């Protein structure tokens, strides 16, 4: 079992390393492609007039800008979470501009008529694909609803139909036709691109307008979807297609760059909102767990102290002080949004256990095997596991039992275990989100989000329960 766990951990590490290296590999490819495209633009630029040279400069600037922005996102954000979808959008925009630049470099040169058809197909496809990558990113900030499912279906269907039209275009021109002179034919206006554009535009606008964003954010994101639409509309204009290809290059520099900047700024605001919501959710989780923990423990502890007031006033006074310390630490921990050291958590646990032993002096036994204490844990993460062991494990057996709390470290993890030889339960049929098993899912969530750890439970009826918390170093 240990060997299997080690192999699993090693595999997970390799995957994480490969994932972290993947964005930098992508940036490397983008750099190579940019240099190659720039070389082609400069070489074919010798045959061009002044306006086409302006277009080539615009394309070069766009390629460099998107490469630098993607590199910056990879270094600063590590493409984690929703940022992966933002990177996907940037890469898609880069590919669309890349093939548009190649298209511009061979436009009007008869010997490159076939290459023009291929570059046009790829440029049109990735330009349309901007809608899908844009939606994949925006979707991360929307709540799942019927609207999001409908928009996903509509945009996916539109891209599929457009892809079929581009494939058909090689056999029968329906989107565009390249003549032997290396220019677009006036006989095939591009109505399909415009129709699909408007179809996707309507879907994205509907999802954005029905969202709960502020008007400023809605306006910013609505601006982001204009680029593919303008591209297709201008491509229908014969002057642009045959005599003014430079306008497409200028369109890239005056539209795509502001869009990226607007998107980047809006993304920062959304990221802050996500962090704020996660912080609030963690606070609510802690408060909810404490509100669940307090009633039965408070009442029972007060009942024990009341009984001791007659039997042993000195012990009652000591218990009252311990109870006050416990409540004070509970309130203090509830206001902490960062992790605490295990030594602090352990001190809190010992107060709790001492009070519980007053209730069950002959039924409850506690053992400690603490080999390390100075590592981070979320506040009130181990204590609920001890409470569950006592309440649901030991107290459900007539003869009582032992709760063992231990901690140790390995090369990779700090590990805390809470085990008991009590009643146990069937883990496969347990529901951890009810009051039967107090705060287990709550605690698992906070351990994962706050310290990147994990919580595992092994139990069987009549054989006790072991809870293992692993926190990576």
Image (cartoon, rainbow, N blue to C red):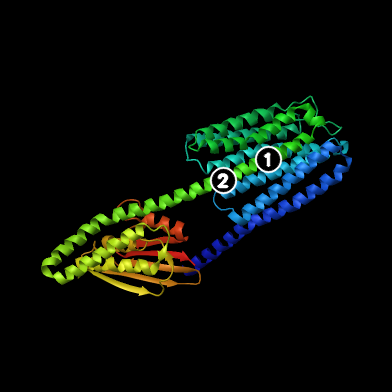
> As drawn, is 152 to the left or to the right of 122?
left
Within 10 Å of the Cα at label 1, are there few (<14), some (14-19), or many (20+) other Cα atoms? Answer: many
Q: Can you name the residue that lies furthest to the top here?
A: 187
Determine the residue positioned at 66% across, 36% down: 227
Q: Give the residue number, with chain letter if any, for mark 1.
A: 256
Q: Residue 303 location, x and y as percent?
A: 17, 60
Q: Residues within 10 Å of mark 2 (few under 14, many from 20)?
A: some
Give the Cα distance between marks 2 and 1. 16 Å
Between disc 2 and disc 1, whose residue precedes? 1
Using the image, tell me which numbered label, if any, was put on residue 267: 2
Residue 177 in the image: x percent, y percent? 78, 30
Q: Position of residue 255 (x, y in %)?
A: 68, 38
Is residue 360 in view? no
The answer to whether 392 is drawn above or below residue 311 in the figure is above
- Between 429 and 263, the residue placed more toward the observer is 263
Residue 325 in sight: yes
Residue 295 found in image quarter: bottom left
Q: Quadrant of residue 327?
A: bottom left
Dot 1 falls on a residue whose secondary structure is helix
Identify whether 429 is placed above or below 202. Answer: below
In the picture provided, is 54 more to the left or to the right than 213? right
At mark 2, the secondary structure is: helix
Q: Give the residue furthest to the left.
A: 310
Q: Is residue 382 left or right of residue 276?
A: left
Against 436, residue 233 (above or below) is: above
Q: Residue 378's mark?
A: none
Residue under the image location 29 percent in, 56 percent down: 293
Q: Which of these two is toward me, 180 or 128?
A: 128
């Amino acid at each position: 079992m240990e060997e299997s766990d080690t192999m699993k951990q090693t595999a997970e590490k390799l995957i994480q390393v490969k994932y972290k290296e993947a964005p930098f590999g992508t940036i490397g490819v983008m750099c190579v492609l940019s240099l190659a495209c720039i070389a082609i633009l400069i070489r074919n630029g010798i045959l061009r007039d002044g306006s086409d040279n302006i277009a080539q400069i615009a394309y070069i600037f766009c390629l460099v800008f998107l490469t630098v922005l993607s590199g910056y996102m990879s270094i600063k954000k590590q493409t984690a979470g929703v940022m992966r979808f933002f990177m996907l959008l940037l890469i898609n925009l880069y590919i669309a501009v890349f093939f548009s630049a190649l298209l511009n470099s061979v436009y009007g040169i008869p010997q490159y008529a076939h290459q023009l058809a291929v570059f046009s197909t790829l440029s049109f496809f990735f330009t349309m694909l901007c809608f899908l990558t844009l939606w994949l990113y925006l979707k991360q900030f929307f709540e799942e609803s019927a609207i999001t499912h409908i928009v996903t279906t509509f945009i996916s269907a539109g891209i599929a139909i457009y892809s079929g039209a581009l494939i058909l275009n090689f056999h029968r021109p329906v989107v565009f036709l390249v003549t032997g002179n290396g220019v677009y034919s006036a006989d095939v206006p591009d109505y399909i691109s415009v129709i699909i554009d408007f179809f996707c535009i309507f879907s994205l606008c509907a999802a954005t307008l029905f969202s709960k964003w502020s008007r400023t954010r809605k306006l910013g994101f609505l601006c982001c979807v204009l680029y593919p639409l303008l591209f297709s509309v201008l491509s229908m204009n014969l002057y642009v297609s045959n005599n003014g290809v430079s306008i497409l290059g200028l369109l890239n520099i005056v539209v795509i760059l502001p869009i990226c900047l607007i998107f980047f700024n809006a993304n920062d605001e959304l990221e802050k909102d996500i962090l704020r919501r996660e912080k609030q959710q963690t606070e609510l989780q802690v408060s909810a767990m404490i509100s669940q923990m307090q009633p039965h423990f408070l009442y029972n502890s007060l009942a024990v102290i009341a009984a001791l007031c007659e039997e042993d006033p000195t012990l009652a006074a000591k218990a009252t002080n311990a109870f006050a310390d416990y409540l004070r630490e509970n309130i203090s921990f509830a206001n902490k949004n960062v992790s605490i050291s295990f030594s602090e958590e352990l001190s809190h646990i010992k107060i709790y256990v001492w009070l519980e032993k007053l209730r069950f002096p002959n039924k409850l036994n506690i053992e400690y095997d603490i080999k390390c204490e100075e590592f981070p844990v979320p506040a009130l993460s181990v204590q609920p596991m001890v409470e569950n062991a006592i309440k649901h494990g030991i107290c459900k057996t007539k003869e009582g039992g032992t709760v063992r709390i231990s901690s140790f470290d390995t090369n990779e993890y700090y590990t805390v275990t809470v085990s008991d030889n009590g009643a146990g339960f069937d883990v496969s049929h347990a529901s951890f989100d009810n009051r039967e098993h107090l705060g287990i899912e709550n605690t698992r969530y906070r351990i994962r989000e706050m310290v990147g750890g994990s919580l595992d439970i092994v139990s069987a009826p009549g054989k006790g329960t072991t809870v293992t918390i692993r926190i990576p170093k």
